[in-house]
Image (tube, rainbow, N blue to C red):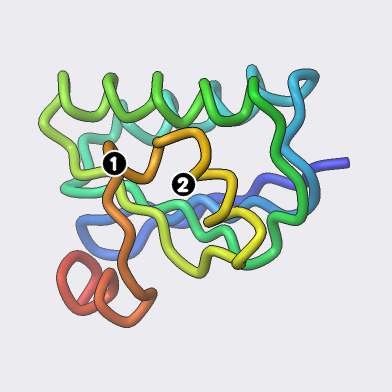
Amino acid sequence: MLVINSMQRDGAVVILLKGSLMSDRTMDVERVFLEEMRKEPRAIGFDLKDLVGLDSSGLGLFMRLRKEAVKNKIDLVFFNITESIIALFDISKLSNFITVMTEDAFRERYAG
């Protein structure tokens, strides 16, 4: 099960994922991302503190969202990532293509 919440703060959007991001929910996350992107924020941050599972479809989704963000000149940031999710990012080499920072750094830079 996956719960998706989004909130806007100043010029940034935070999307919170809670649960497991598996192939059956990637379209839902993409829909929320695209809806938020249409608001033209400076940045979209994914708060992953409550993400407990991620399959290859979820990893592929994050890569697609990164490409979409770059195309639209929006910074895409991931924060509050658990060690198990960081390990998946590293194994898949996704960590070479995404921006990871602390939640405080994200708020200071984009939503302060």
Q: Position of residue 61 (x, y in %)?
A: 52, 23
Residue 63: quarter of image: top left
Residue in the picture at 31% in, 29% down: 66
Q: Which residue is mark 1?
A: 96
Task: Judge left or right: residue 60 versus residue 102.
Answer: right
Q: Is residue 100 or residue 103 the one in the foreground?
A: 100
Image location of residue 80, percent across then percent down: 50, 69
Quarter-of-image position of residue 93: top left
Task: Quote the CA–CA distance across marks 1 and 2.
Answer: 8 Å
The residue positioned 79% from the left and 51% from the top of the image is 19
**In this view, 86 is above or below 104:** above
Q: Amino acid at mark 1?
A: Asn
Residue located at (46% from left, 31% from top):
62
Question: Is 109 above or below relative to 4?
Answer: below
Q: Would you place residue 10 above or below residue 46 in this image?
A: below
Q: Nearer the viewer, residue 11 or 85?
A: 85
Look at mark 2 in the image and give the residue it sits on.
Answer: 90
